[in-house]
Amino acid sequence: MKKTWLVIFFSVLIWSGINPKDYPTWALETAPAMIGFIVLVATRHRFQLTGLTYNLILIHSIILMIGGHYTYAEVPLFDWLKEVFNFERNNYDKLGHFAQGFVPAIIAREIIIRNHVVENINWMNFFIICICLAISAFYELIEWLVAVLSKKAAEAFLGTQGYLWDTQSDMAYALLGAVLALAMLSRTHDRQISKLIAEPVQPRF
């Protein structure tokens, strides 16, 4: 399992870095995936995560790497979907922001449950959604900073495609992702956490 995870991660990362649309945008888009990988390696002995969480992190990383390679406004599959469904824009960035809520919701949930931060399930879900919205808002601030510092890089990094309410819709997609993750995966996540805590923890990589 660990070898498969690593092979997929680095295979997509290497592909992503070969002749991307432009390297500054590639670096900005893939940085969260690489930082996340470093954090996973640094914490693998003292806080192993569930398989569900590791797999979601991998999927999110792949989304970031694809966006870094093509830029979020020019991913070919979503250009095709744009033509087929007569969309006004390439919506790959919305997938990215949806994942920005969906994946952190499960990560935050696991940390909160296993560290007994909040015991009441309703308060826990509320705080998880707040955390995901905070992450989304912080990312929008980073995008704003990039826009201020470099107009050329900002156009590819933001992927607004002229949409006036892009920032607000990005946060709405992150909110939707967080809510759906909690609704769809909580039971599966609980089972995996119980199994992980009951068995001896072995590092994944």
Image (spheres, rainbow, N blue to C red):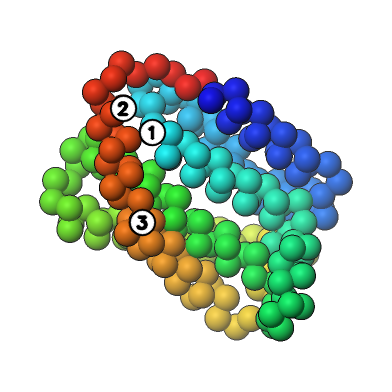
Q: Position of residue 58 (x, y in %)?
A: 55, 40
Q: Where is residue 56 in the image (x, y as percent from the top left)?
A: 49, 44
Q: Is residue 156 visible?
A: no
| CA distance separating discs 1 and 3 | 16 Å
| CA distance separating discs 2 and 3 | 20 Å
> Which residue matches tag 2?
196
Q: Is mark 1 on a helix, strand or loop?
A: loop
Q: Where is residue 145 in the image (x, y as percent from the top left)?
A: 59, 61
Judge whether 46 appears above or below 135 on screen: above
Verify CB contact (< 8 Å) between mark 1 and mark 2: yes
Dot 2 or dot 3: first in sequence order is: 3
Q: What residue type is labelled 1?
A: Thr
Q: Which mark is residue 184?
A: 3
Q: Where is residue 195 in the image (x, y as percent from the top left)?
A: 28, 29
Toward the right, the furthest residue is 19
Give the image quarter of residue 183: bottom left
Dot 1 or dot 2: first in sequence order is: 1
Give me the residue at 38% from left, 26% from top: 48
> Which residue matches tag 1?
50
Binning the other alpha carbons within 10 Å of mark 2 as few (below 14), some (14 to 19) or many (20 upward) gives some
Q: Is mark 3 on a helix, strand or loop?
A: helix
Dot 1 or dot 3: first in sequence order is: 1
Question: Relative to 70, is 64 on the left or the right?
Answer: left
Q: Which amino acid does label 2 sit on?
A: Leu
